Every structure is written in C-alpha cells, then in structure tokens.
Amino acid sequence: MRGSKPPVASDLLDTEKQKARRTASERRVAALGEPWISYFAPSALAAEAAQPGFSSVRDFAPDEANKRYFEGRPDGLRIGASTQLMALRV
C-alpha cells in the first residue's frame, strides 16, 4: 500500500448498513476533533506488514477477536463487524 492511494470506505464495506455505521463513526470522531483519515483492507495491510521484517502477522476478524478477547465479559463489550485487530511480532 506504500505509495498508493488508500482505499475509501466504500471499497472496504460489504453492505449499505456497514457503510452507514462507518459514516456515523467518522462523524462522531470528527466532532471530537479526530478526523478519520485512513482505511485499510486487512489482507493488503497484512501483506505489507510482512515485508519490513515482522516474523508473524496475525489478522483477527471480528468473530475471532470477539471469541478470543471478549468472550465472557460481564459488561458484554464486543467489537463491531467493521473492526479488525492485527497482531505483529518482530
């Protein structure tokens, strides 16, 4: 992705519902003074992260991340469908 134009939200979303949620999130954080300035396709980011020498790149899709990190929380906290977690190891 280096040197290329970052994807826009519509390139990364599968449904109109997801697009509406992303737009609402963009507006919320912009109102707090933190404009949303970038997007990434998880597979492209994982491929790029492997190039500078990370020995391990692990992408956690929302369902996997929720099961691994949020399952059983008494407050019910979960990540949303358009959220990606990635773990990189040197």
Image: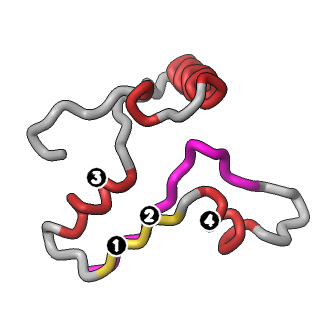
Q: Nearer the viewer, residue 42 or 86?
A: 42
- Mark 3 against mark 4, which lies toward the viewer? 3
In 3D space, how far apart are the residues under numbered discs 3 and 1 (Cα atoms)? Answer: 12 Å
In 3D space, how far apart are the residues under numbered discs 4 and 1 (Cα atoms)? Answer: 14 Å
Residue type indicated by callout 1:
Val
Which of the image's four quarters has the N terminus?
Answer: top left
**Of callouts 2 and 1, which one flags the residue occurring earlier in the amino acid sequence?**
1
Using the image, tell me which numbered label, if any, was put on residue 29.
none
**Of callouts 3 and 1, which one flags the residue occurring earlier in the amino acid sequence?**
3
Q: Quadrant of residue 86?
A: bottom left
The crowding category of the residue bearing disc 4, from other C-alpha atoms within 10 Å (few below 14, some 14 to 19, many at least 20), is some
**Of callouts 3 and 2, which one flags the residue occurring earlier in the amino acid sequence?**
3
Using the image, tell me which numbered label, if any, was put on residue 86.
2
In 3D space, how far apart are the residues under numbered discs 2 and 1 (Cα atoms)? Answer: 7 Å
Using the image, tell me which numbered label, if any, was put on residue 44.
3
Q: Is residue 16 left or right of residue 88?
A: right
In 3D space, how far apart are the residues under numbered discs 3 and 4 (Cα atoms)? Answer: 19 Å
Q: Is residue 56 left or right of residue 81?
A: left
Residue type indicated by callout 2:
Met
Q: Which residue is mark 1?
A: 57
Residue type indicated by callout 3:
Ala
User: Regarding mark 2 in the picture, which secondary structure is present there?
Assistant: strand
Q: Are marks 2 and 4 in contact (CB under 8 Å)?
A: no
The magenta segment: 78-90
Residue type indicated by callout 4:
Ala
